[in-house]
Image (cartoon, rainbow, N blue to C red):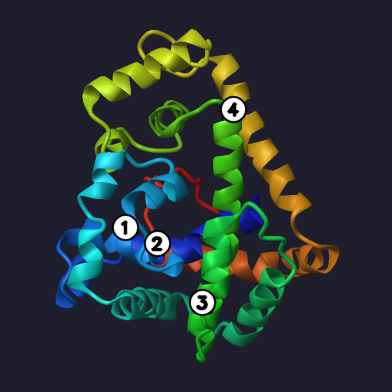
Amino acid sequence: MTFWRSIEAVHDVVYFAPDAKQRYEAIGLKGYWMGYMASRSAAVGTPAPELVVALFQGFAPRMVTRALPDAWSMASRDDVLRVRYDLARDALAPALAGVDTARIANELSAITRGIDFAGKPLAAAHFSLPEPDDDIGRLWHAATVVREYRGDCHIAVLTSAGLDGAAANALAVAAGLAGEQQRRMRGWTEDEWSAAISRLATRGWVDAEGAITDTGRAARQQIEDATDRVCAAGIDREATGRMITIEEPLLAVARAVEASGAVPYPNPTGVRRP
């Protein structure tokens, strides 16, 4: 899990950059969430909101449709991607001072070439993007491919466990992986959230007040364990070896990212600090 949490920290800098909203507005988009929806999905092209709802899973559909497809008429896909990569470079640069960035970028890029992308559409889309010329850009690009690969695997496990977007988020809050603001951050109404908690309570995963039970805690851990198994099954032996080799220096970068304030914890991604 250390490797995956470290990857998450490196990738997540684009979501918590203090000037993300202003940078996306500078190219014509409206507000932070339009920038988020467009920038994260731009690897796919200029997708319809229905496709993005499927790819992201945890967001209320209305939240996606407020941003897409309007974003594609307000800013070009190339500009959206450019801003996203520039946000990553600027946020990561302080954490990479004195680090052999080229080595980490090379190792992560090699790992992406050892992944089976079948059934992992968002990861495959990011892999298909041109690799940046600079080391920080290459590092973030490769980390993003790996991060979305695990995300695709995680969504497959969540849906096979019968968890829709609202229930998956409500369970994360109950487990202490995300804060109380998660409902609002993911666009769910109070009624939708209450219904999700009721569905979890029916399974015995939370109590009537929404507090996680021992059964729910075990189920949540089983979901993480299953995600790890699915991920491992799609990574070849050479890439797996590289993951082990690069884990320690990657962890150092992830902790430097946290120390710089570029990624706060806990946060809406629901991933614990590395």
Which image quarter holds the C terminus?
A: bottom right
Give the residue pinned by disc 4: 161
Which badge, 4 or 3, is on the more N-terminal residue? 3
> How far is the residue under mark 4 from the one under mark 3?
31 Å
Query: Can the viewer see residue 97 in this picture?
Result: no
Q: Check disc 3 and report its element: helix, strand or loop.
A: loop
Give the residue pinned by disc 3: 129
Give the residue pinned by disc 1: 37
Give the quadrant of residue 238: bottom right
> How far is the residue under mark 1 from the one under mark 4?
26 Å
Label 1 crowd bin: few (<14), some (14–19), many (20+), radius 10 Å: many
Q: Residue at x 31, y 58 (%)?
A: 37
> How far is the residue under mark 3 from the one under mark 2?
12 Å
Q: Check disc 1 and report its element: helix, strand or loop.
A: helix
Considering only vertical position in the picture, is 180 above or below 244?
above
Q: Amino acid at mark 3?
A: Leu
Left or right of 186 in this view: 158 = right
Residue 41 circle label: 2
Q: Residue at x 70, y 70 (%)?
A: 111
Q: Check disc 2 and report its element: helix, strand or loop.
A: helix
Asked if disc 1 and disc 2 are in contact, CB closer than 8 Å, the reply is: yes
Considering only vertical position in the picture, is 189 above or below 62?
above
Q: Position of residue 125 (x, y in %)?
A: 52, 66
Which badge, 2 or 4, is on the more N-terminal residue? 2
